[in-house]
Image: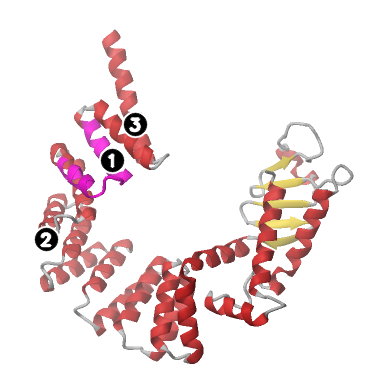
Amino acid sequence: MSLRLCLGKFLNECQGVSAILWRNNDKILGKTFRSVLSISGNSPLSPAGFSGLKAVIKGIEKEKNAGKEKTAEILVTEGMEKTIKIEKPSENRKKESVPEGEVGQEKSAAFSYNTVTKSLTFHGKKYEILPIFLAVRDIYASLPFFEELQYCTERLEKDPQDATALFQKAVLMYKARRFETALQLTAQVLKIAPEDHRIWYNRGVILSELGRLEEALAAYDRTIELEPTFEVAWDNKGVVLARLGRFEEALETYEKIILKYPRYAEAWAGKGSILSALGREEEAFEAYSSALRIRPDYLEALTSAGSLLSRLSRLEEALKIYDKALELAPTEPRLWAARGFVLSEIGKHDEALQNCNQALELKPGFVPALETKVKILSEIQRQKARSSQ
């Protein structure tokens, strides 16, 4: 299907979404939908924001249906340096690339799409496609939670200061990966309940997802200030400090948690990851072992311990760790790939290939498995070449 048809279909579908959210024949229903899904009035899908694209859709359809009498050329531009021309549908010639020196001569094209800026140009006018795509994605991501969101919205219509409903709606928006909307909702809840540590914690999680790490750190600090016994906030603080490259502070944070809660396996695993990053590998392994003594089925600790043992060339031990991990998660491709790598290092190439193939069956194109498989096949080929000499 040509780019023109794909974009035309996409824009038609977006227009359909817009028509549902801003229903002329039932404005109350449209308002309800927008309220439940947290769609703002200035959304790219609003009639005002979408009005210019309506003409584009009609123009695309008109030129598509004109057939041989009138056909539009399509340009797919990948930035300023390269332009690819897709042939008119009415011509029976093979598609050809436009030489770079001729890009400036393509002024007659009615319709072009820049894959870098995500902008559509139609008869000289530019339209931003990315905000529309993101708006549609947000709507579809929210649909699995529609009934729960509707319940929260109904409660908020009765009482806009219902902190519980706002809190629940923020959690649902986070689950839908609509982090900006979730963050806005937590801000509203904090105006009502500024001393609730759960809200500050959730705000930290959302900010971390958005990459706003310093703000996330401040939110976790506030959580700990309000509720010092909330272990997971300490744990997440350590993770954020590590992401900021502040490893010594992260290590200090984990040691504080362990001092207070010596049976908190996640803190031991977190300490292990920091020690590993600092190059203190033997200490890291001891930390992972402590986590596993508390929780023998702790998959992340098993995976991290296996990886560390592999780096330390303690391959037989690593193999045993991966075997145990695979008992817990037999459909996890990264474990099969990791086990395949260890087997390849031991020299058990046939079994290693089987492990890599298992990983690729579970996740086609999985890069670690592909890389190990290529390495094994190359080694087998070298061995055959040596034996034939």
Farthest top residue? Answer: 389
Percent position (x, y) of residue 111?
76, 52
Ranked by sequence position, the earlier of labels 3 and 2 is 2
Identify the residue under disc 2: 294
Span shown in magenta: 320-345
Ranked by sequence position, the earlier of labels 3 and 1 is 1
Q: Secondary structure at mark 3?
A: helix
Q: Is residue 227 left or right of residue 181?
A: left
Q: Nearer the viewer, residue 53 or 96?
A: 53
Instruction: Give the label on residue 336, or none.
Output: 1
The three-letter amino acid code for the residue at tag 2 is Ile
Q: CA distance from mark 1 to mark 2?
A: 25 Å
Magenta stretch contains residue 171: no
State yes or no: discs 3 and 2 in contact (Cβ < 8 Å).
no
Q: Which color scheme is applied?
A: secondary structure
Q: Quadrant of the N terminus?
A: top right
Q: Is residue 272 left or right of residue 116?
A: left
- Total number of numbered discs in the rendering: 3
Percent position (x, y) of residue 71?
83, 46
